[in-house]
Amino acid sequence: MFSALALLSAALVPQLVSGQVPRLGGVNTAGFDFTVYTNGSFTNNAAAPPTWQYAHFSGEGANLYRIPFAWQEMTPTLGGPINETFFYEEYNPIVQAALASGPDSYIIVDVHNYARWNGEIIAQGGPTNEEYASLWSQLSTLYGGNTRLLFGLMNEPHDLDIPTWAESVQYVVNAIRAAGAQNYLLLPGSNYTSAATFPTGAGPYLLNVTDPLGGTEKLIFDVHRYLDYDNSGTHAECVTNNTEVFETLVSWLQENGNRQAILSETGGGNTASCDEYLYQELAYIKATYPSMVGFSVWAAGSFATNYILSMTPYSNGTDQPLWNVAVRPNLPAPV
Ligand SMILES: *[C@@H]1O[C@H](CO)[C@@H](O)[C@H](O)[C@H]1NC(C)=O
Ligand SMILES: *[C@@H]1O[C@H](CO)[C@@H](O)[C@H](O)[C@H]1NC(C)=O
Ligand SMILES: *[C@@H]1O[C@H](CO)[C@@H](O)[C@H](O)[C@H]1NC(C)=O
Ligand SMILES: *[C@@H]1O[C@H](CO)[C@@H](O)[C@H](O)[C@H]1NC(C)=O
Ligand SMILES: *[C@@H]1O[C@H](CO)[C@@H](O)[C@H](O)[C@H]1NC(C)=O
Ligand SMILES: *[C@@H]1O[C@H](CO)[C@@H](O)[C@H](O)[C@H]1NC(C)=O
């Protein structure tokens, strides 16, 4: 299925081959997204992720950090200009700390708004595609020069018309390229970007999204998957390693032009069941590169160390047990 060069590269070192992002593994650093609700409202309890965590995790072999933010923080007026105080004094310093934490650190710039602004869906009664694209056109001007910044076009769209959503995705892809940015773009489906329903839900529509740069190497599908009984990521116990879900997804990717996906959220509690199942899930993701580009677990950053899915290290520098057992061995180059 894959070129010998890609397989050789994947087996030896996770280096960038032409048009392909290296194998990625790391963690979400939450905080700027705090109190964005699933209806796209935001009550501004944002808390900047602590910068020391990036050097900490990179020292252990992580090379991917997803840094969510609320759309309303970045552009306080819908369709209006980026708040330069927020961007230059708050968000960008965190992004720069993450980039500086390792020579091959990749960052997902993630607008965490569920395809919504204050309860209303993009191009489906709410913001226009132009207003949505305005955010990304501005970010493209600011971040287009660095292809280690992956653009997460939207966190967890849900309960919307999928064909219309695919048109919004195409609109924003075109706007990003028109602004001159060549970054990798993470395309989200619906159903909270469920990995399980992607091949039969939004997947067939997002396959038709084209890249004005040509090819599809820079269009990566964005999926999420948890391991608790209802796939909500709100319970400490894990009940599955999701192998069937990812086998189905990987087959679908390979059958549809050798496309790629990234697991940008997954995780569990500090329990024996998650030690076992999360380890197995991430080992599978790591083994299926380059179909699966990699993973970022949920979540460190400003979460307390006792949050149910916390990956936040303790103040004495010790990691969460689940991180040590299940995540760290599956990082691209574990130390
Ligand atoms: C811009 O961001 C700064 C820093 O977060 C904040 O204090 C200010 O209120 C924001 N401006 C607007 C118009 O929201
Ligand atoms: C969004 O959800 C929050 C939390 O449930 C709620 O307080 C708020 O009123 C909702 N906003 C809109 C616009 O529906
Ligand atoms: C969303 O996922 C749920 C299960 O997680 C499934 O029952 C439902 O059919 C999915 N919806 C779509 C539109 O794929
Ligand atoms: C994708 O495009 C192809 C070719 O134009 C078309 O046949 C197919 O129906 C499209 N798929 C969806 C889900 O719209
Ligand atoms: C996931 O669990 C199934 C069922 O227990 C098992 O057959 C499979 O080998 C596991 N997958 C991995 C990657 O360990
Ligand atoms: C660090 O703190 C955690 C949480 O309080 C504790 O479980 C662990 O034993 C501590 N480790 C060291 C080396 O002090």
Image: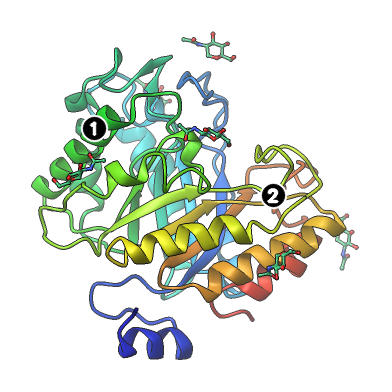
Residue 319: tell me if it is visible: no
Residue at the spot of label 2: 227
Q: Which numbered disc covers residue 55?
A: none
Note whether 158 is above or below 66 in the view shown.
above
Note whether 212 is above or below 86 in the view shown.
below
Q: Check disc 2: other Cα within 10 Å, few if <14, some if 14-19, many if 20+.
A: many
Q: Earlier in the sequence, mark 2 or mark 1?
A: 1
- Residue 294 image position (x, y, % from top left): 49, 65
Residue shown at 30% from the left, 85% from the top: 3
Residue at the spot of label 1: 168
Is 183 or 267 nearer to us in this picture? 267
- State the separation of the CA atoms marked 2 and 1: 30 Å
Is 79 or 309 nearer to us in this picture? 309
Q: Check disc 1: other Cα within 10 Å, few if <14, some if 14-19, many if 20+.
A: many
Tell me the quadrant of the picture where the N terminus can be found: bottom left
Residue at disc 2, secondary structure = loop
Residue shown at 25% from the left, 65% from the top: 217
